[in-house]
Image (cartoon, rainbow, N blue to C red):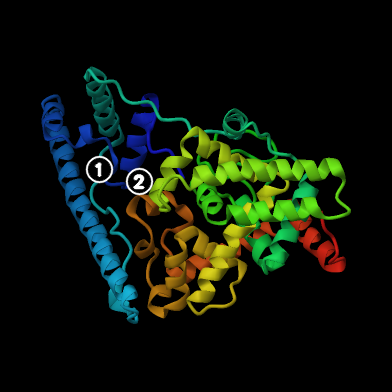
Amino acid sequence: MMKTNTPTWTRRKVMAALALAGVGMTLLQPLAANAGIAEDFLSRLNAPQAQQFQTWRAARHAHEARVDGYWSTVEKKRAERRKKKAARLELVANDYVATFPPKYEGPQLPPDLLKAWNKFIEDEEAKLEKPPVPPKEIPSVDDFLSASRTVYGFTPERVSEAAFKQRYAEEAVALGLSKAQVVRVYALETGGQGTADMQSGVNPISKRGKPISTALGYAQLLDANSVSEIAKHGHRFVSRLQQMAAKPDTPRERAAQLRSKATILTRMIADAKSVPNVWASHQSFAKTPQGQGIHAINLDGDIGPMLQTIKLLGLKDEAAKAGKPSLSGGEMELMNLAGPGTGLEILLHPAAAAAPTTNFFARKAYNVNKMAQNLTGAGLLVELDRRMDAAITKPGSIEFSQAFDALAASPVLSR
């Protein structure tokens, strides 16, 4: 995820970059598209400049109309495909837009005139009585931990990376997930060097950067994912903790710790189930102190591996129900990136595999997701595998692979 609000001081640079790159005016500030504002600007130009500006602006509007029409067709075909899929009808090439978005090939505004236009817009915006709304900060790991302590009186147990990977491997194997599936997803989601407390946007090694989404951990679960999985599978986690505590060889102090976690998790489950079991409700709840506190359990050495592997199992189970009993790591990540249903559409329908990726993402998501641009569905899978192949050689991926190897060599390993 990316922030969509841009601080005022950078807007002129953003507008200039977008215009020079050929990005449509609908992506710029609404003020810039205002006809009255444009007329005011024109009145300040000499005749040659005015002609250049009018020619450029007309070309931009014509281009935007084509782009809008393109995306309107994409949405229409997507709605029609939903109906066909619901009726279990075969999808064919005509169900997809066969081309990529039109590129702007019209005249460019001279740099000095573009600079003057952007400065004019910035000055006009400053005159508005209502100041721009500052971007809302995305909560950080510290915020999630604070919410967990405040709401639930719970501080996740932090363990070493080696221990977390070992526990993750145990949970994955117990659920029927393979080393290749889990480690390759980890490699793609974290670049092969992610830590258990990794948050999207923050370098897991240097800890520098600012969060660009709430995604945490090896599988990069969003806050709403954590709420959904706890609502759906939380009692399974409670049972697992209780079983671990009841083992004869579990030390008394460790058993008490596990039972305490089970009690707290039971409260979290009740809270997660207090809202409708739909994604939109989980997204909203995830922004509350309760939701943020729940998201923090990704960091716990016992619960985190359960939570993240069960999310991956959900993808595998959904694929099996659709008639695809086995998934490669790349295919699993395709379902994770595009959404389970859309990922399966690409994997199971040749027409979808051959179609441009614009058919599978909302307009805004496509524009910010560089990895998915200018590819077909099949091409996106190839790109995912290419990136996985590169990241699988990184230290974190190697350590994760070794955790699975150790488990295979000694299957009696347990906590």
Pair 2/1: label in front: 1
Tell me if I can see residue 144 in this picture: yes
| Residue at the disc numbered 1 | 25
The residue drawn where x is 57% and y is 31% is: 151
Label 1 neighbour load within 10 Å: few <14, some 14-19, many 20+: some
Nearer to us in this view, 404 or 167: 167
Amino acid type assigned to the residue bearing label 1 in the image: Met
Indicate the quadrant where residue 74 lies: bottom left
Nearer to us in this view, 152 or 13: 152
The residue drawn where x is 16% and y is 28% is: 41
Q: As drawn, is 321 to the left or to the right of 107? A: right
Amino acid type assigned to the residue bearing label 2 in the image: Ala
Q: Position of residue 242 (x, y in %)?
A: 73, 52
Indicate the quadrant where residue 55 lies: top left
| Residue at the disc numbered 2 | 21
Tell me if I can see residue 223 in this picture: no
Q: Considering only vertical position in the picture, is 256 above or below 225?
A: above
Q: Which type of secondary structure does the marked residue at label 2 adopt?
A: helix
Nearer to us in this view, 398 or 322: 322
Nearer to us in this view, 115 or 102: 102
Q: Position of residue 111 (x, y in %)?
A: 31, 35
Q: Which type of secondary structure does the marked residue at label 1 adopt?
A: helix
The residue drawn where x is 57% and y is 69% is: 316
In the displayed orientation, state which residue is furthest to the bottom: 90
